[in-house]
């Protein structure tokens, strides 16, 4: 279609502000709702142990923000047409879905049967599968994150005849 090839100009500064805002929200989930129990945060007794500001939504919010951030930043770097934005969205949805499906217990059993033992190249994949938790909610969050990213990118772009 002709409109897919139409050159667009993304307001990168605004999109990066959206992405940074999503990063802050994601970090809040890890610090407050998950009480700092993730590998990339320092092990200090400063995390609130009883506070949960995001409630049940905090369980899927990191997946939503990952998808949103990856799509927004990738689009700012690469996309020059609406078609590129679609490709970026689809690519990250496939990546995020794959990472979620790898966490399913049946996949973990399969990976274990492949003897992905300590010291092999496949060990990180096996450990990710072993310690991850598969969730339908996360799969839905991937779709929501992609749709929100697409909306933000389109609202912060200029394209001939479409705005």
Image (cartoon, helix red, strand yellow):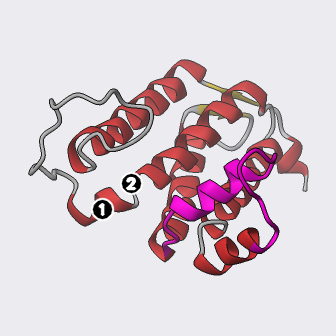
Q: CA distance from mark 1 to mark 2?
A: 6 Å
Q: Report whether 155 appears left or right of 22.
A: right
Residue 64 magenta: no
When the figure is inspected, residue 161 is found, relative to residue 93, above or below; the finding is: above
Is 127 contained in the magenta span? yes
Residue found at the very far left of the displayed protein: 50
Q: Quadrant of residue 29?
A: top left
Q: Quarter of the image containing the N terminus?
A: bottom right
Residue ranking furthest to the front: 118
| Residue holding disc 2 | 61
The kind of secondary structure element at disc 1 is helix
Residue 81 screen position, x and y as percent: 81, 38
Disc 1, disc 2: CB below 8 Å?
yes
Q: Quadrant of the C terminus?
A: top right
- Label 1: how many Cα within 10 Å (few below 14, some 14–19, many 20+): few
Is 89 in front, or is 123?
123
Q: Residue at x 77, y 59 (%)?
A: 116
Q: Is residue 116 above or below residue 25?
A: below
Residue at image mark 1: 57
Magenta segment, which residues? 113-135
- Residue 134 versus residue 72: which sits nearer the camera? 134
Q: Secondary structure at mark 2?
A: helix
Q: Is residue 89 left or right of residue 69?
A: right
Q: Position of residue 63 (x, y in %)?
A: 49, 54
Q: Residues within 10 Å of mark 2 (few under 14, many from 20)?
A: many
Q: Given the current orientation, which residue lies at the most extreme bottom position?
A: 106
Q: Residue at x 23, y 50 (%)?
A: 33
Answer with left or right where residue 33 lies relative to residue 139: left
**Count of numbered tags:** 2
Q: Tell me which residue sits at (67%, 77%) in the image.
A: 109
């Amino acid at each position: 279609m002709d409109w897919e090839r139409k050159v667009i100009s993304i307001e990168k500064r605004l999109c990066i502000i959206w992405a940074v805002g999503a990063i802050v929200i994601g970090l809040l989930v890890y610090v407050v709702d998950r009480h700092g129990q993730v590998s990339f945060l320092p092990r200090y007794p400063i995390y609130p142990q009883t506070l949960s500001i995001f409630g049940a939504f905090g369980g899927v919010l990191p997946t939503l923000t990952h998808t949103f951030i990856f799509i927004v930043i990738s689009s700012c770097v690469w996309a020059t047409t609406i078609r590129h934005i679609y490709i970026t969205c689809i690519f990250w949805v496939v990546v995020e879905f794959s990472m979620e499906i790898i966490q399913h217990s049946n996949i973990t059993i399969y990976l274990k049967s492949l003897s992905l033992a300590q010291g092999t190249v496949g060990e990180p994949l096996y450990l990710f599968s072993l310690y991850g938790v598969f969730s339908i909610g996360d799969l839905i969050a991937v779709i929501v994150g992609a749709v929100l990213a697409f909306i933000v990118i389109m609202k912060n772009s200029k394209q001939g005849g479409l705005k």
